[in-house]
Image: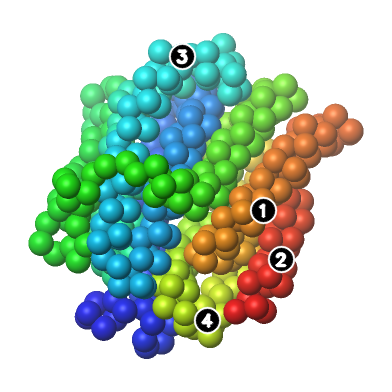
Amino acid sequence: MSAQERDFSVGSIKRQIMAQAVPLTVAQVVQLLYNVVDRIYIGHQPEAGDLALTGLGVTFPVIMLIAAFTNLFGTGGTVLFSIARGRRDEAEAEKVLGNVFALLAGASVVLFALCYPLRRQILFLFGASETSVFYADQYLQIYLFGTAFSMLATGLNGYINAQGFPRTGMLTVILGAVVNLVLDPIFIFGLGMGVRGAALATVLSQAISAAWVLRFLTGKQAILKLRLSRIQISPQRTRQILALGLPGFVMQGTNSLVQIVCNNQLQAFGGDLYVGIMTVLTSVREILSLPVMGVSNGSQPVLGFNYGAKENQRVKEGIRFTSVIGIAYTMLAWVVVMLVPRQLMGIFTSDSAIVDTGAQMLKIYFFGFFFMAFQFVGQTAFQSLGKAKQAIFFSLFRKVVIVVPLTLLLPVIGLGVQGVFWAEPISNAIGGLACFLTMWAVIYRRL
């Protein structure tokens, strides 16, 4: 990008959003390989692949919890950072970056200290059985050592993108993912480490990604740098970061809560087989959600910059554009799921029981998938413009008010284990439309 192209208040806003979104999407695809490739290799192990896959699924709430705190500081700070750039207040933007670094580093130490000694108890609480906990603990006891690497790499990478360097941000993730792709088969199969090998490969790749991000943000190429003199926690600035990052934290935190409730209900009504199926379905959803997430995340710095520059018509145009792209893509993804459910399941496992039963559950879980785009677009608009309270409310509304009660209720009123899978599409429709229509009324029409 040229210097002019990094000024998001001039030129085509559609092109600027896509210039951010495309490399972001590629980066997210590659980042997803960190965990998805682990699941694919583990699921295809010749012995106990199905149980190992189930064990890996039980670790998801812990991984989501770490991601929630990463979003709390990283995403909240990115919004402040982008608005400060729009006001041309570079000193404040660098102070935000330094504050976020200190918060991420401190939180990673606290999370490791809390989770590591209690990991087995946590895994049983999160839905592990006496059989699957063996594999879950093998993965988690190594993965937790990479907490700081994961939080710094993911939480700080947004500050590369927000400066108009999306390709560099993309390379952050590509570098780590390539290392993970190379090391996974070596550790899992070559050295016979199994689940432990998958975790070790992930930790090493995250370490390399973190080193790349820190090298860029402290180097000459960065417009706004991570400076030692700026690494300090300001109570006032931290409150602003937490307020704006809370929606992302709530989204990830409630994802963790939903996964915990799902695992326990699946274990009670179906057993380890259905926990393994949900592990695969979660992976498929993550893959298919990436493009719409990329467009939403790519629009955040552009919308925030233009809002800070008081270019309201450009903000409205950006919201319209992300809405059309997101809805069109998710409708296409829904069609694909309905046509090839068995093939999608077969990517992750060769176990016939998981493939056969999972294909049926996949059609239920993804029913009306396009409603999810409404949630993404509404949430992004609220967060990009600093409307934290609305963003938090709709995060809680969809997950806590709709998904969790439905997950608990539907299985006991006659739907059995299928009720757990029906909770997701129902919540997408109700929560997504409520979020989008409210955003349209209280933000879009008033800009």
Label 1 vs 3, first from the N-terminus: 3
Q: How crowded is mark 3: few (under 14 residues within 10 Å), some or many (20 or more)?
A: few
The quarter of the picture where residue 110 lies is top left
Label 4 vs 1, first from the N-terminus: 4
Residue hosting label 1: 394
Q: Which of 278 and 265 is in front in this view?
A: 265
Please tell me the numbered disc located at residue 438.
Answer: 2
Label 3 vs 2, first from the N-terminus: 3
Amino acid, disc 1: Phe
Which residue is situated farthest in the left direction here?
220
Please tell me the numbered disc located at residue 93.
Answer: none
Q: Which quarter of the rendered picture does the N terminus lie within?
A: bottom left
Foreground: disc 1 or disc 3:
1
Residue hosting label 3: 118
Structural distance between the alpha carbons of marks 4 and 3: 49 Å
Does the rendering let one see residue 131? no
Residue at image location 61% in from the left, 50% down from the top = 392
Foreground: disc 4 or disc 3:
4
Residue hosting label 4: 312
Structural distance between the alpha carbons of marks 2 and 4: 18 Å
Q: Which quarter of the rendered picture does the C terminus lie within?
A: bottom right
Does the CB distance between marks 4 and 3 fall below 8 Å? no
Does the rendering let one see residue 434? yes
Foreground: disc 3 or disc 2:
2
Does the CB distance between marks 2 and 1 fall below 8 Å? yes
Secondary element at tag 2 = helix
Residue at image location 30% in from the left, 36% down from the top = 105
Which residue is situated farthest in the right direction here?
413
Secondary element at tag 1 = helix
Structural distance between the alpha carbons of marks 2 and 1: 10 Å
